[in-house]
Image (tube, grey):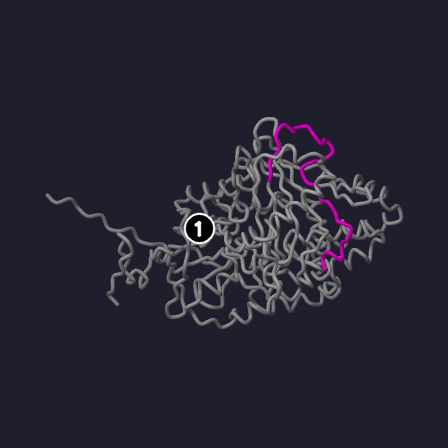
Amino acid sequence: MDLVVSVGRRRYCPLMLTHPSPDSAVVVGAGLGGLAAAMRLGAKGYRVTVLDRLDRPGGRGSSITKDGHRFDLGPTIVTMPEVFADLWAACGRDFHSEVDLRPMDPFYEIRWPDGSKFRAYQDTERMLEEVRRLSPGDVNGYLKFLKSAEARYRVGFEGLGRKPMHRLWDTLKVIPTFALLRADRSILGHASAYVRDPRLRMALSFHPLFIGGDPMHVTSMYALVSHLEKEYGVHYAIGGVQAIADAMVRVTEDQGGIVRLGAEADEILIENGAAKGVRLTDGEVLAAPTVVSNADAGHTYSRLLRNHRKTRWTDAKLNARRWSMGLFVWYFGTRGTAGKWPDVGHHTILNGPRYEGLLKEIFIKGRLADDMSLYLHRPSVTDPGVAPEGDDTFYALSPVPHLGWDDPVDWFEMRETYRQKVAKVLEETIPGFEAHLSASHILTPEDFRDRYLSPLGCGFSIEPRILQSAWFRPHNVSEEAKGLWLAGAGTHPGAGLPGVVSSAEVLAKMVPDAPRVAPEPQRMAAE
C-alpha cells in the first residue's frame, strides 16, 4: 500500500506501520499505571511516547485548581511506598529524594452515627487501645485477624500481585492455599469470624471500597490491606498524587521519552496479529511494535480494538463482568477556616446508619439510597499549599451505583439534589461550613464516563471479585495481539496505587529489553 492520508496540514503514511522502529513503544494513558509502564520500558531501553487526552498527567490521580484550591481528583493516600521506591530504583533513581512523602498518624478516623469513633494507627498497641475502647471482648480476635491479614498479604500480594498471572496454571496451583485461607469467604464474613462488634467488622472490612469492591462479596484475601497499613503505614505526598504523576513524567522525559497531553488515542492498530501502532483521534499515526494500554481494559477491548476480531475479551464477555461502583465526589473550598473544626483531620470516614444495607443498594440493587456513607478528605491540615492562606480544601466522596443498571441515575437531574444531601451529612461533622464555601466542583459517574472513558462510569474498572482476579482478569499481556500489553486498574493485580504501579512491574517482567538499533549513518558534507 502506498496511499498517503492527509489530515489537516499533516500527512501520514500507512507505510510507517510496516516497519516501525523495533525499540519504539507507545503508552495509551498517562495514569499512574501508564506512567509506571513508561518508566519501566524506558529503563529497558525503549523510546517511549505516552499519550493522554487530559491536560495534566495522572489520570484518575490528576488534579484541578479553582480559585486557589488544588483538588486531588482521585486517590489521596499511599499505602505501600515500596512499590514506588522499587520503580524509581529500576530507573536508577531515588523516589524519596524526588517526592515528599509524609506519614499519617493516625491514618484515618472512622465515625458512626451513635457518636463512637475509631482511629487507625500503625502502632499495634495504640490499635489495641482503640479496639479495647470499642469492644474489650474483641481484642484477642483482632490480634488473630492481624495474623490472618499477614498470611493473606504473603500469598495475595507478594505471591500473586507482583507476578504475571496470564497462565491458568499459575492461578490453579494456588487454589489449595486459597482454600486453606478461606479465600471463598468475603472480607466482611472474614472479619465477622474474628470480631463481634459490628463497628469493628466495618472497620476491618471496608478497605475494598477504595478499589471498587463490595465487602460483602470480594474475597477475604483483601484482609491483606490491614497488614499493608501496619507494615508500611499510610502516607500522603505533598502536592498530592499529582506530584507523584509529575515526578513520573520527569523521569520518563529524562529517559528520552515523550509525554503528549491533549492527545487522544482512537485505535490500536493491529496487522497480521501484531500491534503496529496507535492512531489518534486527529488521524495522526504513531508506529510502534510495542503498545501498552493504560486505558480502562473495557475501553481498550471495546473501543480501541473495535476493528479487530477478539478471541477472549469480546463485547459479550465484557458485558458479563461485574463492574465496580460509581462515585459522587464533591470538591469544595472554605474561606477562613484553617484551624476551625480541630477534631477533623486529614482522612475521616463518616458512616451512615446502615453498612450492609447500603452495600446492597449500591452493588446488588443499583439504587441511589437516601442515606449514605462519606469519605471526607481535608488535605489542608497536612499540605497548606492546597488552599489559599487561612482557607481549607476538602472533598467528600460517596459510593453510588454505576450507570449500567436498568434504571440508572440521571445525574443531570440529581447532581444538585444529591450535593445538598451530602452537605446535610457533612453539617454534623463540620458545622456551619456552607457559610464559608468558595470554590466548588462535582464529579458524578457520568463525569467518570466522559472524563476517563470509564465503562458504565464506574470508579475502579472491573470489580475485584475472586473470579475476576488473577487469571480471570484481563491479562497484562494481551491475548489479542502480539506486542500489546495492559497496565492499570482493569488488569492484574487491580485498582489502587499499589495495584496499578505493580501492573507495570508485572508487565516489565514479560516485555523483553529493547532491541539495539544501529544508529543512522551520518552523511558527509558535500565538498
Query: Which residue is rendered at x = 28% and y = 62% of the image?
Result: 15
Mark 1 surroundings within 10 Å by alpha-carbon count, few (fewer than 14), some (14 through 19), many (20 or more): many
Q: Which residue lies furthest to the left in this view?
A: 527
Q: Residue at x 43, y 55 (%)?
A: 513
Image-based side of 124 in relation to 387, left or right: right
Q: Is residue 347 magenta?
A: yes
Residue 448 position, x and y percent, is 54, 53
Q: Depth check: 260 or 224 in front?
A: 260
The percent position of residue 527, horizontal first and vertical second, equals: 10, 43
- Quickly name the residue at label 1: 53
Query: What x and y, as percent, mark residue 462?
Result: 59, 61
Q: What segment carries the magenta color? A: 332-360
- Asked which quadrant contains residue 278, the reply is bottom left
Residue 309 appears left or right of 133: left
Please state if 390 lies on the left or on the right of 5 as rendered.
right
Q: Element at badge 1? A: loop
369, 150: nearer the viewer: 369
Q: Where is residue 160 in the image (x, y as percent from the top left)?
A: 63, 59
Compared to residue 265, the image places residue 379 above or below, namely above
The number of numbered badges drawn on the structure is 1
Where is residue 239, by image quadrant? top right
Nearest to the observer: residue 125 or residue 184: 184
Q: Which amino acid type corresponds to the residue marked 1 in the rendered image?
A: Arg
Give the position of the N terminus as an image quadrant.
Answer: bottom left
Q: In this view, does 68 lie above or below 206?
A: above
Q: Is residue 484 above or below residue 198?
A: below
Q: Which of 405 and 283 is in front in this view?
A: 405
Residue 100, above or below 158:
above
Q: Is residue 467 magenta?
A: no
